[in-house]
Amino acid sequence: MPSPILPAKEVEEVVTANEEVTDIIVQRVPYWDPPTVRALDTSELTTWSLYRALIGEFTASLILLYVSIATVIGYRNQSSGADERCTGVGYLGVAWSFGATVSVLVYSTSGVSGGHINPAVTFALFIAGKVTLVRSVLYVAAQCLGAVVGVGIVKGIMKHPYDDFGGGANAVAGGYSLGAALGAEIFGTFVLAYTVFSATDPKRTARDAFVPLVAALPIGLSVFVVHLATIPITGTGINPARSLGAAVLYNQHKTWKQHWIFWVGPFTGAALAAFYHKIVLRDEAVVKESLEKLGSFKRSGSTA
């Protein structure tokens, strides 16, 4: 196991109460970068911690879908036949429902499973070498199953409004092409995964340790702002489990016909965020070495 990186001492200029400039030594908090996991490692299958994590992901996905889909159906029910500006929670309330619930669940579940609650986030972390293939596949299965159960509870409680108002299923809104919807899902998921990587980066955690915020807050806020931008286009997926759970219980042809968008888009956006994390946020040596080798190859080829 690699040793933690020692705290660095930096000199900063500070203006005192007497308006005099003085130098002080600032000691940064040490941090430790977890090693990249082996993608095909199966040793986790014999550990109870993996199954605790799966239960955590299942439960969190269930809660997310119950709260958020119930909010969507309630909003559509309240605002039907009336001025949407005056009844129901509106788009803003729906966005807050998703964002705040994600923030609460990430905070509550991060100590058990890492608080993914989204197959696209799990996929991004897999590409970044932070979780194994086995854990990734099992997480996605648990998330999807929890989502289906969560939406099933909503349907059982709100039977008639659920059927009448679309079941909270994602669909491309009128006036938008499939390409536009796919682009919205890609970019929306990129924003979410980008925030996840930034908020959980060990260097940031060490540098900003004095800030009384947790990673759950910016992650929830990213979900909130993406919903504000994307609800009018696709209803906002950015979470394949959320889209699958609603599609299974609503079970309409149009929903299934467009369902591929809500897997391809989020997974593509997640992959882009993972590569951005490696190249820009972390400036990983392996990436630089690959680029340097490529440059050397091109130079040697040109002089031959």
Image (cartoon, helix red, strand yellow):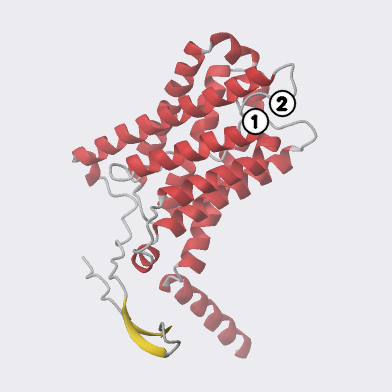
Image location of residue 6, percent across then percent down: 25, 76
Is residue 278 toward the left or the right of residue 205 in the image? right
**Residue ID at (48%, 62%):** 277
User: Looking at the rendered structure, which numbered label has been put on residue 90?
Assistant: 1
Is residue 29 toward the left or the right of residue 223 in the image? left
Identify which amino acid the numbered label 2 is placed on: Glu
Image location of residue 223, percent across then percent down: 54, 44
Of 100 and 48, the residue lying toward us: 100
**Residue ID at (63%, 86%):** 302
Q: Quadrant of the N terminus?
A: bottom left
Tell me if residue 118 can be seen.
no
Label 2 Cα neighbours within 10 Å, binned few <14 / some 14-19 / many ≥20? some
Of 213 and 289, the residue lying toward us: 213
Identify which amino acid the numbered label 1 is placed on: Gly
Give the total of numbered labels: 2
Tell me if residue 191 can be seen.
yes
> Mark 2 — residue?
84
Of 66 and 253, the residue lying toward us: 66
Image location of residue 255, percent across then percent down: 64, 24
209 shown above or below 173: below
Label 1 Cα neighbours within 10 Å, binned few <14 / some 14-19 / many ≥20? some
Whichever of callouts 1 and 2 sits on the residue coming sooner in the sequence is 2
Picture quadrant where residue 71 is located? top right
Image location of residue 81, percent across then percent down: 74, 16
Whether pointer 1 and pointer 2 mark residues with C-beta atoms closer than 8 Å, the reply is yes
Q: Quadrant of the C terminus?
A: bottom right
SS of the residue at dot 1? helix
**Residue ID at (19%, 38%):** 48
166 shown above or below 111: above
